[in-house]
Image (cartoon, helix red, strand yellow):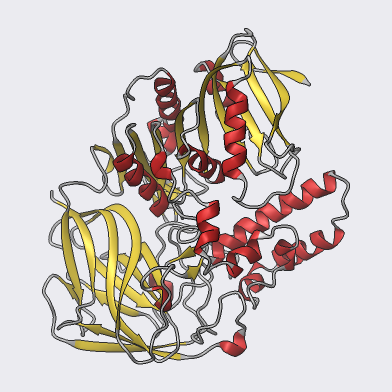
């Protein structure tokens, strides 16, 4: 089946089927110039049940000399099989690459392109060093499916997990209906969840989500296999990506939920791969590259302002030609300043500064006197999510509470379960660019606890704008492969990864660090009982007394990457 594609020049499109090693066939749409000659191919693999030609740069890619193949992942669209999140992407991707390089319309060279899941499938194959793969261009990608997508330092990323499963469940039900299956019950269950997302977030146990788990096994699988590292290693690419030998252009956003992963993929491949890697990070969220995020407009921050798509195609074109890319190694948007090129990430000239939390609620460079502060945490009344690097659906009030970006934290001022440590008024501008982490010495009266940390930019007019935040689940303080229960009342050291940013904090502003024990519904509520995340109910909830130690031999602090003026 063939057709025509409107645009400059003459092009044709046709449906193609790619055979897999198990006999199933994956459906795709091929766009190619109508001159009949072989071309390098841009391969896009997607699970989203449509060619996505409206959002993909198909015409610009054709004009750049590529043919374009947009393939539906196994079990999606018209492709055979069952869709099982991430589980078949390496084998199916390798089979597809091998088949494409042998087609008369391919000259033996293939590049891969796409964001989010479409970027993950690139890293799923690049470390296997497949013949013909010439370059990858992943945008907004995690580095680890367990500690980076499903979880963050032990806490289940409920907000994004439910949002994605609601989206994908709707598409899966549509695919099943087109195949003639009875989806009335599944559709009704999904509709019930989507009618009241606030109730869907709060419903316990977490494993009980029939509207999504009936059609997407991954919902229950992610919860049930939290403590099975072999499963996650088997479906992921974290350990295999170091085998990548082709150039890569990694694109991230300061407010994208996968920013840590994008930066991790770049730094890992830049150190391990013989091919040059490039990085671009803008003031973007996962679904918006307009340069307007949260409550802030970032001048010149739109992807279109730096011609991002043009840069990506130039990078891919130079890669298939075997030429070093003309792009700078690193391009970052410094919020409060603008775009800047760099030679590496993190920046070599960084002044790593330690700012200590004080017993009087202060934040400063000098080690304070020893002290402790306490607050009560009730999982029945968690601290609500307000902005950040998030991707969620719904809102508690129909407003913008669950929108990503820098949001004013004053809506939380009346909460007594948040400790706030505020620094002095800055005498001059301070640029903070790089990864940020908090070291927290803390104890809980419960069998388990979460500790959250948030960096806040306090403006002279009182606005308290969130910058970055993170969380750690106490029993996973040594990593998700080494869970260790806590002894109630005993003090432990916790390292909380807040991700990264690039921001000029203006003179007259103050820096602040907020400490709490929940960020819901972006993360699930820790019941305090130590029970498995997928099985607990409100009957397991325990109100806990949390104690944070500062100064002396247990100096809780934040490490800031300050860039010299």
Residue drawn at (61%, 56%) of the image: 164
Residue 534, percent from left and from top: 60, 74
Residue 299 visible to the viewer: no
Residue 246 visible to the viewer: yes
Residue 207, percent from left and from top: 65, 72
Relative height, residue 446 to residue 139 (above, below): below
In the displayed structure image, the side of residue 531 where residue 377 appears, left or right = left
Q: Looking at the image, how many numbered discs can be counted on the residues? A: 0
Instruction: Name the quadrant of the N terminus.
Output: top right
Residue drawn at (17%, 51%) of the image: 350
In-front residue for pair 1/201: 1
Residue drawn at (51%, 90%) of the image: 542
In-front residue for pair 375/127: 127
Residue 447, percent from left and from top: 45, 88
Relative height, residue 297 to residue 280 (above, below): below
In-front residue for pair 445/452: 445
Relative height, residue 281 to residue 201 (above, below): above
Residue drawn at (66%, 24%) of the image: 30
Relative height, residue 42 to residue 149 (above, below): above
């Amino acid at each position: 089946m063939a057709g025509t594609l409107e645009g400059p020049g003459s092009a044709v499109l046709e449906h193609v089927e790619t055979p897999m090693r198990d006999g199933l066939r994956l459906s795709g749409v091929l766009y190619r110039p109508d001159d009949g000659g072989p071309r390098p191919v841009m391969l896009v693999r997607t699970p989203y049940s449509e060619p996505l030609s409206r959002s993909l740069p198909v015409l610009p890619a054709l004009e750049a000399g590529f043919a374009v193949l947009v393939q539906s992942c196994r079990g999606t669209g018209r492709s055979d099989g069952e869709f099982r999140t991430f589980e078949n992407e390496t084998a199916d991707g390798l089979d597809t690459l091998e088949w494409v390089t042998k087609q008369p319309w391919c000259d033996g060279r293939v590049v891969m392109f796409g964001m989010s899941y479409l970027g993950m499938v690139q890293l799923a194959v690049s470390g296997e060093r497949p013949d013909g793969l010439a370059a990858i261009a992943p945008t907004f990608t995690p580095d680890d499916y367990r500690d980076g997508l499903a979880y963050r330092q032990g806490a289940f990323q409920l907000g994004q997990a439910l949002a994605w499963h609601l989206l994908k469940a709707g598409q899966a039900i549509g695919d099943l209906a087109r195949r003639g299956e009875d989806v009335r019950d599944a559709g009704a269950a999904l509709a019930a969840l989507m009618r009241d997302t606030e109730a869907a977030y709060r419903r316990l146990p977490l494993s009980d989500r029939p509207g999504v788990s009936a059609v997407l096994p991954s919902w229950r699988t992610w919860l049930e296999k939290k403590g099975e590292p072999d499963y996650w290693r088997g479906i992921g690419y974290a350990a295999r990506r170091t085998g990548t030998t082709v150039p890569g252009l990694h694109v991230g956003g300061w407010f994208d939920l996968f920013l840590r992963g994008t930066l991790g993929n770049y730094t890992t491949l830049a150190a391990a791969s013989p091919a040059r890697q490039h990085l671009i990070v803008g003031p973007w969220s996962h679904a918006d590259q307009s340069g307007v995020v949260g409550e802030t407009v970032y001048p010149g921050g739109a992807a279109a302002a730096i011609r991002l798509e043009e840069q990506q195609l130039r990078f891919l074109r130079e890669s298939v030609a075997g030429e070093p890319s003309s792009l700078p190694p690193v391009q970052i948007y410094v919020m409060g300043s603008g775009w800047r090129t760099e030679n590496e990430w993190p920046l070599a000239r960084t002044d790593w500064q330690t700012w200590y939390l004080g017993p009087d609620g202060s934040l400063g460079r000098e080690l304070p006197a020893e002290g402790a502060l306490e607050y009560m945490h009730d999982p029945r009344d968690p601290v609500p999510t307000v902005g950040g690097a998030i991707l969620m659906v719904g809102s508690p009030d129909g407003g913008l509470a669950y929108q990503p970006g820098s949001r004013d934290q004053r809506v939380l001022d009346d909460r007594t379960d948040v400790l706030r440590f505020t620094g002095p008024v800055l005498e001059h501008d301070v640029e903070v660019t790089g990864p940020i982490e908090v070291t927290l010495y803390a104890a809980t009266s419960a069998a388990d606890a979460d500790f959250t940390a948030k960096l806040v930019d306090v403006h002279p007019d009182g606005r308290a704008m969130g910058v970055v935040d993170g969380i750690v689940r106490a029993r996973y303080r040594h990593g998700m492969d080494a869970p260790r229960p806590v002894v109630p009342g005993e003090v432990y050291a916790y390292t909380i990864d807040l991700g990264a940013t690039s921001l000029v904090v203006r003179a007259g502003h103050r820096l602040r660090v907020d400490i709490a024990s929940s960020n819901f519904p972006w993360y699930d509520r820790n019941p305090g009982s130590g029970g498995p995340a997928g099985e607990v109910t409100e009957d397991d909830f325990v109100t806990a007394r949390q104690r944070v130690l500062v100064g002396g031999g247990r100096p809780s602090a934040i490490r800031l990457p300050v860039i010299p003026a």
